[in-house]
Amino acid sequence: MRRTGAALAACALAGSALASECPGNPDAIGTARTIAVDPVKHARIGTIQYPDTLPLRDKEVVLTFDDGPLPPYSDRILDILAAECIKATFFIVGRQARAHPELVRRLHDAGHTIATHSENHPSPFSGLSMVRIAFEIDEGIASAQAALGDKRNLAPFFRFPGLRRSGMGETYLASLGLTAWSADIPSDDWRGIPAHEVVARTLGHLERKHKGVVLMHDIQPVTALALPDLLRELKVRGYRIVHAAPAGPKRRPIAAPKDWVLRQSVPSWPRVTNAVPAAAAKDSQVPAEPSRPRSDAPAESACSVSSQADQLDWCGREDSNLHEFPH
């Protein structure tokens, strides 16, 4: 117990030093510490769908980005993260990695965790056959590894497209030794809302949960517009950024197992929404753009019985996988 406490303290101190030594930006929020994730011990993460999530302390946040890479938005997000000395996790799509391998390598060179998000981002993923599930997972991994040039640089993490998981998919991931990632905090950056609303919704969810894995999309221009204001507000409110990375010989999990448990026709992907800069939206009083109807979304009545659904702005029954989730 004494050694575990010392390790936690050492990790926190090391992260604090990094946060205060961001070249060219003494006010950067930085990266407070790194959490090591072992897929063998933790097969599923994220309380939107699973009981387990990362063992974060209050006011700790892990930033994750889906669907990229896609210039110029992924480039801009990387610039913002670099200026703040932040390390994040990117769940990349295989065909995007093949189209933009230089961006995948830039992600790695910047020290971010690179994970996978299927080869083609099919929707709904939960309706695929086992053959197609295996193809999407395997090819997505192969494309990411090819872009990186070294398979050791790819994390054993996978996030289902649209968070539309399936039992067959989860079983297949476990057979490959991969962790299935959901999230704790949605940003709603895919809904066509302005940048200031993305910031407000993300902070609102965080204020209710106090910590968590944030889900964003680096293919969305609104995300690039919202991110600087979001990071500024996170620092003002006392939040700290945590980097999630795969466990290895030099990086081992130190949290107790109990600390991982928290919870008692649309255009084809990628769907990139128009963005309204936060300042412009406030000055012109541009209202938030309503959610666009989706052919695969559940009936409105499916949401009425869940208070958590009202808070998170998604709905449905977990046992049937009928949810409205981000692309």
Image (cartoon, rainbow, N blue to C red):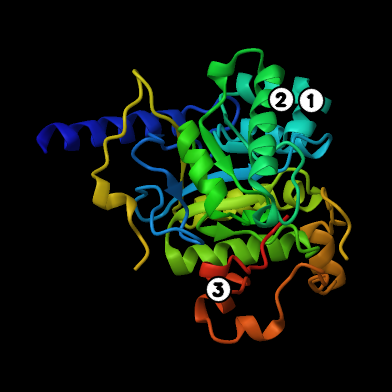
Residue 249 figure quarter: top left
- Vertical side of 132 occupied by 299: above or below: below
Measure the C-alpha gap from mark 1 to mark 2: 6 Å
Residue that carries the numbered disc 2 in the rendered image: 143
Q: Position of residue 196 (x, y in %)?
A: 72, 62
> Could you classify mark 1 by the number of other residues whose Cα lies within 10 Å: few (under 14), some (14-19), or many (20 or more)?
many
Amino acid on which the number 2 mark rests in the picture:
Ser
Residue at 86% across / 62% down in the picture? 266
Residue at 65% across / 40% down in the picture? 117
Where, quadrant-wise, is the C terminus in this rendering? bottom right
Where, quadrant-wise, is the N terminus in this rendering? top left
Is label 2 in a helix, a strand or a loop?
helix
Residue that carries the numbered disc 1 in the rendered image: 98
Residue that carries the numbered disc 3 in the rendered image: 317
| Mark 2 or 3, nearer chain start | 2
Q: Are marks 1 and 2 in contact (CB under 8 Å)?
A: yes
Q: Is residue 307 left or right of residue 100?
A: left
Is label 1 in a helix, a strand or a loop?
helix
Amino acid on which the number 1 mark rests in the picture:
Arg
